[in-house]
């Protein structure tokens, strides 16, 4: 039998961040993931990236992995440009206005996972079980028993479900879920552009949804996230590459010059998920297993990393380990933050979607006012970069 104070199911960036933070706090950890172990980055950019906020950067610095992430590929951006298509609404700000070295970084998710994986391999109080599935999970008042498919039993004081948006653990333990379909699909790809990105993260709100151009390490490459209606996503995905490139250039209004897709396009549906219950005995939810939101503000990864940070803090306190009180404190604080961001994303989606003349006027006036009122613009900008 294997024993651990904490068993984490899910070896994504959030689960591995939790594992490293707990291990550095002298807590014994076991990680189970059905996928293979993280690998070094390929030469080609991956099309799944995250906008890492300054707060998340600080978190990685404290864990001692930020320089490893940067040494792979992490692109700082110093400017943000947000505008509404076909209206006068625009807001732009930069790091100098906020007295910051940069506004954040665009990082491939695989780079984060590999840096965390490498750091975890150096620690004696961590067991990493990739390519491993569990068979059953049972809990008592004080422990959780996980039986692996190999038949090996694992006993833990706490089980953390970091197993993604379709969490099997959340389903097994009947932890109720509120969800709705955003009626958007997101197309992601790496795009080569004629003009350099100038360390600028761009977002334009189209009638059918937002399109983001995120700068990558090569100044002529962007990662795009094009959120649009399912019907429009189907049409765009069916276009030959040349026609897709033309549609992309029109959508971004030529801001980056001619666009050319550099790798395969991928598409996935967007849904809001919010677990009404994050705690069941000694089982707790975290990351996408607890919440998913629209990617229009790039907050998803940062919300999950904050989950990990708060749980590490609660579990690292002296005294009895993983008390119900400590877990309830984690649940309460993180549910409140998730609710706030879910509501904010829904409001932004509804405001910026569609061609209703009244909404377009509100959007135009609102963005222009924010862009021209210094104190309000500073508050908006600091919220956007996680300060």
Image (cartoon, rainbow, N blue to C red):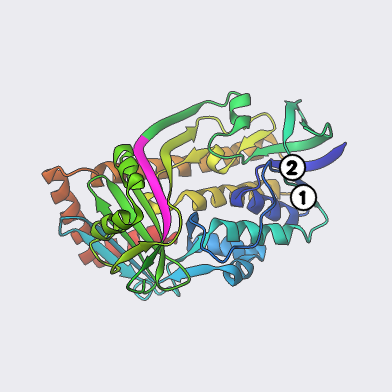
Count of numbered circles on the image: 2
* Secondary structure, magenta segment, majority class: strand
For the record, the magenta segment spans 182-190
Q: Which mark is drawn over residue 27?
A: 1
**For residue 366: magenta?**
no
367 lies left or right of 18:
left
Q: Of residues 176 and 194, which is closer to you in this image?
A: 194
Tell me if mark 1 has few (under 14), some (14-19) or many (20+) residues whose alpha carbon lies within 10 angstroms of its own: some
Of residues 77 and 284, the one drawn nearer to the viewer in this rendering: 77
| Category of crowding for the residue at label 2, using alpha-carbon neighbours closer than 10 angstroms: few (below 14), some (14–19), many (at least 20) | many
Q: Which of the 4 image quadrants contains residue 95?
A: bottom left
For the residue labelled by badge 2, is the local secondary structure a helix, a strand or a loop? strand
Q: Position of residue 188 (x, y in %)?
A: 42, 52
Outermost residue on the left side: it is 357
Determine the CA span between mark 2 and mark 1: 8 Å
Residue at image position (55%, 43%) is 287
Residue at the spot of label 2: 6
The location of residue 44, given as percent across then percent down, is 53, 64
Q: Is residue 187 magenta?
A: yes
Q: Quadrant of the N terminus?
A: top right
Instruction: Tell whether label 1 touches label 2 (CB within 8 Å).
Output: yes
Q: Earlier along the polypeptide chain: callout 2 or callout 1?
A: 2
Q: x, y percentage for residue 282?
A: 70, 32
Image quadrant containing the C terminus: bottom left
Q: In the picture shown, does residue 79 fall above or below 131?
A: below
């Amino acid at each position: 039998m294997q024993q651990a104070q904490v068993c984490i199911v899910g070896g994504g960036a959030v689960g591995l961040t939790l594992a490293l933070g707990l291990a550095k706090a002298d807590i014994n950890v076991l990680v189970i993931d059905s996928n293979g172990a993280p690998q070094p980055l390929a030469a080609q950019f991956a099309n799944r990236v995250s906008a890492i906020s300054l707060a998340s950067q600080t978190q990685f610095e404290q864990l001692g992995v930020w320089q490893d992430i940067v040494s792979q590929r992490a692109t700082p951006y110093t400017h943000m440009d947000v505008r509404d298509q076909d209206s006068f609404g625009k807001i732009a700000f930069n790091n100098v206005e906020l007295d910051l070295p940069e506004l954040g970084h665009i990082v491939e998710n695989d780079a984060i996972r590999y840096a965390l994986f490498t750091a975890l391999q150096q620690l004696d109080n961590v067991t990493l079980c990739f390519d491993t599935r569990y068979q059953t999970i049972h809990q008592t008042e004080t422990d959780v028993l996980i039986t692996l498919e190999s038949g090996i039993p694992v006993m833990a004081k706490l089980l953390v479900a970091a197993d993604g948006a379709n969490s099997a653990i959340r389903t097994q333990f009947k932890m109720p879920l509120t969800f709705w379909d955003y009626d958007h699909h997101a197309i992601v790809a790496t795009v080569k552009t004629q003009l350099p990105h100038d360390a600028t993260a761009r977002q334009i709100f189209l009638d059918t949804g937002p399109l983001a151009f995120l700068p990558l390490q090569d100044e002529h490459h962007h990662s795009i996230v094009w959120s649009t209606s399912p019907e429009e996503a189907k049409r765009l995905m069916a276009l030959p590459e040349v026609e897709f490139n033309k549609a992309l250039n029109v959508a971004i209004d030529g801001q980056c010059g001619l666009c050319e897709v550099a790798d395969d396009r991928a598409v996935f549906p967007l849904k809001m998920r919010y677990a009404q219950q994050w705690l069941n005995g000694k089982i707790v939810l975290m990351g996408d297993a607890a919440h998913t939101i629209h990617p229009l503000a790039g907050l998803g990864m940062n919300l999950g990393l904050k989950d990990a940070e708060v749980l590490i803090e609660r579990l690292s306190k002296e005294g009895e380990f993983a008390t119900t009180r400590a877990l309830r404190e984690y649940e309460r604080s993180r549910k409140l933050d998730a609710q706030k961001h879910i509501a904010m994303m829904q409001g932004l989606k509804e405001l910026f979607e569609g061609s209703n003349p009244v909404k377009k006027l509100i959007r135009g006036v609102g963005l222009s006012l924010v862009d021209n009122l210094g104190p309000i613009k500073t508050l908006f900008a600091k919220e956007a970069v996680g300060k």
